[in-house]
Amino acid sequence: MSLFSDGLIERRSVFAFLLLLTCGTVSIDARVGQATGPDDTDGKKQGDVYSGLQPGEVTQPFKVLRIKDDEPDEVELVKNGEEGVTLVCFVHRLSTDDRILYGLGLVDFYASRFKQLNSHFILLSDEQNKMTTLLRGWSRGPIFKKSLVGLSLDGEEGPGYYGLNRQVDMTVLVIKENKVVDNLVFDAPNNFDLEKIMQSAAKALDQPKPTLTTVQNELKAERQRELDKRIKASRVFKLAPNEELGRIMFGLVNARGNRAKNAERRSQQLVTWAGDSKERKIALAKYCTSVLKADFPLDQFARAAVKKLAVSVDQ
């Protein structure tokens, strides 16, 4: 169940939000080899392959390009004398696929619980312009609320002092008092590796060991609360004669994925809601008419569906 898979770069942050809302994180077929379970590896090495500073070694500050909205800026990480625990995830391979960032959103959610935990996700790449564009899209999305997302200023090799191995997919360092307390190396990282990262951070923080399922469920509940808040604050919901209609219409107005299928599914839900009740059919037709008059940003499929319901439901 690798966190990598072929895919497009555009619109990832919104799609990732929906994936995380549905299942907490992603689980897809491994790119190479078989998927690993929770006990297949200790996370510190794959065979005899190592990457990065080892436990007990002293860190040094390094600079990255922080990608935040439209204004990237250089910042220094792992500063001398930095308090608390620092988690640094070096992502080595992202030139054609950003699927790994889906999973790291779960780590960010866990990190957001602790003020004393600094979390950084750093992409290593020689394609600075391309990667800046990709990460800018992620910075605008709802996934990374606490963690710094940035691009290494040292290209795909990363900061030289750290001795990173570009043949692996991800190197994770857990740092406390400017010393590495844990080093984890992953090739084709999967969901259970996310659990190892969170558990390593928890150990450094002297916190109870989290489980993947627990954090996923907590994230799912949090995303649902956020979505409910968005729905209830929306104009299309407030315009609805009741909550059920408002929720369905919100999904029609804010389409994601296959918009034609979404419009078909949502319009069928509206028809089902009306059923054989003349009163409900009239209420639905009036609501659809109001939605059209309010000039919501409906795509062509949604607009056609609402128009059809506005004129035909009560016939």
Image (tube, grey):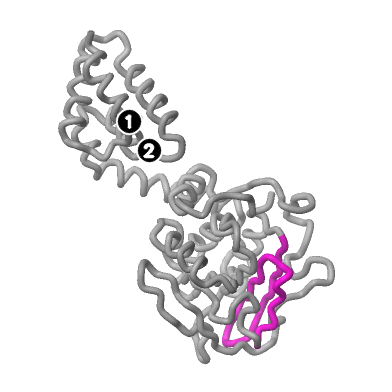
Residue 62 in view of the camera: yes
Span colored in magenta: 161-187
Report the amino acid beneath label 2. Ala
The residue under the point 61% across, 72% down is: 90
Q: Between disc 2 and disc 1, whose residue precedes?
A: 2
In screen coordinates, is 25 left or right of 277? right
Verify whether residue 127 appears in magenta.
no
As displayed, is residue 292 above or below residue 78? above
Residue 255: numbered disc: 2
The residue under the point 68% across, 87% down is: 57
Q: In which quarter of the image is residue 103?
A: bottom right
Q: How crowded is mark 2: few (under 14 residues within 10 Å), some or many (20 or more)?
A: some
Residue 302: numbered disc: 1
Q: Which of 175 and 288 is in front in this view?
A: 288
SS under mark 1 = helix
Q: Which of 132 and 50 is in front in this view?
A: 132
Report the amino acid beneath label 1. Ala
Instruction: Name, please, the residue furthest toward the right.
Output: 48
Confirm or deny contact between disc 2 and disc 1 (CB under 8 A): yes
SS under mark 2 = loop
Residue 182: numbered disc: none
Verify whether residue 180 appears in magenta.
yes
Percent coordinates x, y for residue 42 in the rendering: 76, 65
In screen coordinates, is 305 left or right of 284? right
The quarter of the image holding the C terminus is: top left
